[in-house]
Amino acid sequence: MSLQLQQITVLGATGSIGVSTLDVVARHPDRYKVFALTADRRWQLLATQCLQHQPRYAVLNDAKAAANLTAELQRQGCETEVLQGASALEAVAAHEQVDTVMAAIVGGAGLLPTLAAVNAGKKVLLANKEALVMAGGLFTQAVQKSGAVLLPIDSEHNAIFQCLPNHRSDYLARGLMSSGVRKILLTASGGPFRNTPSCDLAKVTPEQACAHPNWSMGQKISVDSATMMNKGLELIEACWLFNARPHQIQVVIHPQSVIHSMVEYIDGSVLAQLGNPDMRTPIAHALAWPERMESGVASLDIIATARLDFSEPDLLRFPCLRLAQNAADVSGTTPALLNAANEVAVAAFLSRQIRFDQIAQLNEEVLSRLVAVEPTSLEEVQSADTEARAMASQLINSW
Ligand code: NDP
């Protein structure tokens, strides 16, 4: 079968998802050509990636890093053009020659470039869950308006997408029940502190929090997994992606991370998607969708897996999950406020300014002090984000 070469922009190319994406793309030179690669400031890794993939553009957020990359690529005789700044990120996401955009910038910084890709009607592979958490309503309206194809990269959402009926437009228009879906079972490994007594959580270090038992990921999502905020953000993400109500999503602890999520139908059938915990599977699935292609992921050894355990999450030990569940219920700008407070809290924990257990405390405190609204514009979302970041920083300084 002859395939048309797809031009791809990878936003967040130097991160964990970006590196896995380039690994998959490099296995299929007959299908994909890298158009642009972007990062915040890690220009050395971006230089290596440019030399391997020869993109037309490389974008760095940081001006000094961009100057260093320009000099290095000139020295190496690489023709990639280096751009810099937020508007350049949006430009390479929306460029007319681009077919597919991997949205893998971490945090709220990914919102505008991801939306630029959506508004330009691209095939958007969404890893940057924070974009949907912050601005789910406006984001999904933009998808409908532009005709962009939005495919989930989070392993759980990719699993749910695979287990839901093929006729996506039905459940997106009329809700999950109309497609015979009773509920979604969103699995969670429980992170590195699944069995740690609450009283010991105050003492955990950034290194311990980032040492996830099953997945190798960036620092922010690793800490979010340890607090279970990641599962809360995923719950909000799933509501927007699948037109689900929060009560239709049950979070289930599954420490082996072999089942990536499940969908239960009204006839009692439960469909699950299984695989090794390797992000190249959902990346390859979304890249090739609706076809399938090799990802480089080893075959699942189901005999060696032997057992699959399930339990309920402990909301007392993981208050961030409770906060996110409540935010999903009330919606409006509450998820944006929570997301922003959490980004500040995680950064402060990673720089040892606050303790691990203070991440949830800070999030709760910020939510209790700020008033959420029903956003009708992106500016309102951004203003909620700014307000929550300022409040979180102020609280940290006063502690
Ligand atoms: P990483 O921290 O590993 O990488 C983040 C990427 O974003 C890097 O390329 C980084 O550049 C870039 N970046 C950071 N800040 C900015 C900014 N202000 N402007 C432009 N670029 C920026 O993150 P992950 O790959 O782990 O996660 C990326 C997203 O995917 C997150 O939203 C996460 O929740 C989601 N996700 C990740 C999974 C995983 O397995 N890692 C699984 C499922 C979802 P630089 O290298 O220069 O800092």
Image (spheres, rainbow, N blue to C red):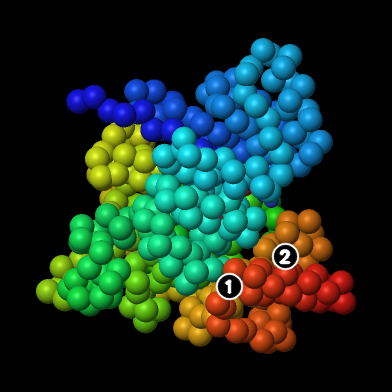
Q: Number of numbered discs present?
A: 2
Given residues 90 and 212, the one toward you in this image is 90
- Structural crowding at the residue carrying mark 1, measured as other residues with C-alpha within 10 Å and reported as few (<14), some (14–19) or many (≥20): few
- Give the labeled residue for mark 1: 377
Give how far across and how far down residue 84 sits, in percent. Answer: 71, 39
As drawn, which residue projects farthest toward the right? 398
Given residues 63 and 95, the one toward you in this image is 95
- The quarter of the picture where the N terminus appears is top left
Q: Amino acid at mark 2?
A: Val
Camera sees residue 254: no
Q: Amino acid at mark 1?
A: Ser
Residue lying at 54% horizontally and 61% vertically, measured from the top left:
131
- Give the labeled residue for mark 2: 344
Q: Which of disc 1 and disc 2 is earlier in sequence?
A: 2
Give how far across and how far down residue 211 sits, in percent. Answer: 59, 50
Say left or right for 368 vs 240: right
As drawn, which residue projects farthest toward the left? 267
Residue lying at 30% horizontally and 58% vertically, measured from the top left:
161
Give how far across and how far down residue 123 sits, in percent. Answer: 40, 47
- The quarter of the picture where the C terminus appears is bottom right
Residue lying at 71% horizontally and 32% vertically, measured from the top left:
43
Mark 2 residue's CB less than 8 Å from ligand 1: no
Instruction: Examine the image and state in which quarter residue 283 appears.
Output: top left
Given residues 161 and 313, the one toward you in this image is 161
